[in-house]
Image (spheres, grey):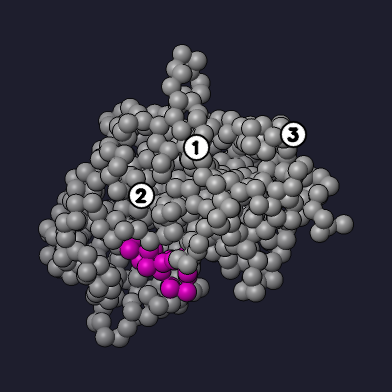
Amino acid sequence: MKLTLVLLVAVAVVSTTFAKTVPSGKRSRLPMELLGGMFGANFQAPKVPKDYVPNPRIVEDRFTSRINHFDPQNRDTFEFNFLWNDEYYRPGGPLFIVVGGHHRTNPFFIDETHFKDIAALQGAFLATNEHRYFGTSVPTEDLSSDNLRFLRTEQTLFDLIEWIDFLKREVMRDPNAKVILHGFSYGGALASWARQRFPNIIDGAWVSSATVRATVNFEEFTEDFGNTIRIKGSDECYNSIFRAFHTAENLLDAGRTDIVSSLFNTCDPIDAENSLQVELFLHLMTLSLELSMFDDFNIENVQRVCNVLTDEQYETPMEALAAYLKDRYSEIRDCFDLSFENFISILGDESVDAPQNAEFGLRQLNYHICTEFGFFQTAKSRDQPFGSKVTYDLFLAECSAVFGEWLTQEVLYDGVRLTNFHFGATDPRITNVLYTNGGIDPFRHVSITEYTNLLANARVTPAAFYTEDIRAISGMDSEEMLETKHMAEEYITTWLGSPISPFRK
């Protein structure tokens, strides 16, 4: 919804890098990738290979659902997008669903993953849906705060269940077909909650990096990010970042804003008396490193960035950090704009067609996490190198400024509390769900990493990053990763009962 607001993301389901500038095109405005990172857009969907060509057997269609499932007096409807493929389906086989999250639909996730390979073995019908309010599935004419009130997890679950019933009865012509769900990040959480709420309809779910525990203060993220820098970079790199951030904070506290402003090339001098501007500045510095080090979900980039940050040509770590960030964005901006008002104006655009909304779903995602999930990446823990000033006050102010004064701290806290109360957070009392996470995936801290009962389990793959386990089996897989993927196949086979695959005995 961010990494920071997060977690919990788009381009054809958002591979991972965003368009490089905000819609206005001004050379001083914030790069779109930073805005996306602010709300977890960069981590909503795993990277899709650039050379991927969709399977021609995949069919695109639309399903009509009610805008408000819980108001019998409101009969308004909308259509959401979905994809399906019956290439591997054999009569009597199950329905395999990749549950859509905060991103556009993408055929890749029913075409080139381990879940698809299991579907082929099981003779399954494959499909994936687009989440309401994202991509081409927006149910209202604009994204005003009033219209966004239908962006609720409970509404989405009913979209999913009614669509599944439609597929079984009208498309597969088999109302008794078993149903297996799969999903990642927030889509994974939805898949597990669907099994929890509708065990009579959903027979099992395999979820990867599923963000099932809502939290206002997601300080574990920065801690884990720091540990990854130590592991994949070096202690020297960690210490350099620590010194750079704390030096900047100390200079701002001492009133030497001229030094920091000049070094980081801000459009206007940093106002040290404006706590929100200071927090925004420091948080965007952290996000910039995050985006660089996790670019294309390749954590080997950590060492590449660390090589620059520890280069001996720079006299101080702060100079090295400033030089790196200026160089990263030199082609798309002349200076770094820290205006909270400009920042808010981009998110305040209620147009469905605005690029930040149509392509990346930023306003929609922001609303959903401000009202149900939180996931605010703070820097209050002492066990991380990114300073100490970024608190959830920054995100609370952003939520209220974008959506209205009604969205108070009390509303936000209550939304997070109710999400955990309704779905059980890390103790959902659930069966027939397999939770998988990577050992260096920061979202494992809001997922389930230890959970066992008769037909449910959780597994963490050592040294694996975000959603690595959903990829098709390859010769690059470690023994631990192969074990995770085989475990997913075995659990799904168990949930289905006797497999119909002719390749199994």
Q: Which residue is mark 2?
A: 359
Q: Residue at x 21, y 43 (%)?
A: 345
Q: Position of residue 314 (x, y in %)?
A: 25, 82
Q: CA distance from mark 2 to mark 3?
A: 37 Å
| Amino acid type assigned to the residue bearing label 3 in the image | Asn
* CB-based contact (under 8 Å), mark 1 and mark 2: no
Q: CA distance from mark 1 to mark 3?
A: 23 Å
Q: CA distance from mark 1 to mark 2?
A: 19 Å
Asked which quadrant contains residue 365, the reply is top left
**Is the stretch drawn in magenta largely helix, strand or loop?**
helix
Task: Please tell me whether residue 414 is drawn above or below residue 218 in the rendered image.
Answer: above
Q: Residues within 10 Å of mark 2 (few under 14, many from 20)?
A: many
Element assignment for label 2: loop
Residue extending farthest bottom: 312
Q: Which residue is mark 3?
A: 176
Q: Upstream in the sequence, badge 1 or badge 3?
A: 1
Asked which quadrant contains residue 109, the reply is bottom right
Q: Upstream in the sequence, badge 2 or badge 3?
A: 3
Q: Residue at x 49, y 52 (%)?
A: 106
Q: Which residues are magenta?
A: 286-302
Q: Which residue is mark 1?
A: 62
Please name whichever residue, 175 or 6, is drawn nearer the observer in this view of the structure.
Answer: 175
Q: Position of residue 457 (x, y in %)?
A: 71, 50
Magenta region includes residue 366: no
Q: Upstream in the sequence, badge 1 or badge 2?
A: 1
Magenta region includes residue 299: yes
**Horizontal side, residue 333 vs residue 389: left or right:** left
Location of the C terminus (image quadrant):
bottom right
**Horizontal side, residue 352 vs residue 27: left or right:** right
Task: Please tell me whether residue 248 is drawn above or below residue 45 in the rendered image.
Answer: below
| Amino acid type assigned to the residue bearing label 2 in the image | Glu
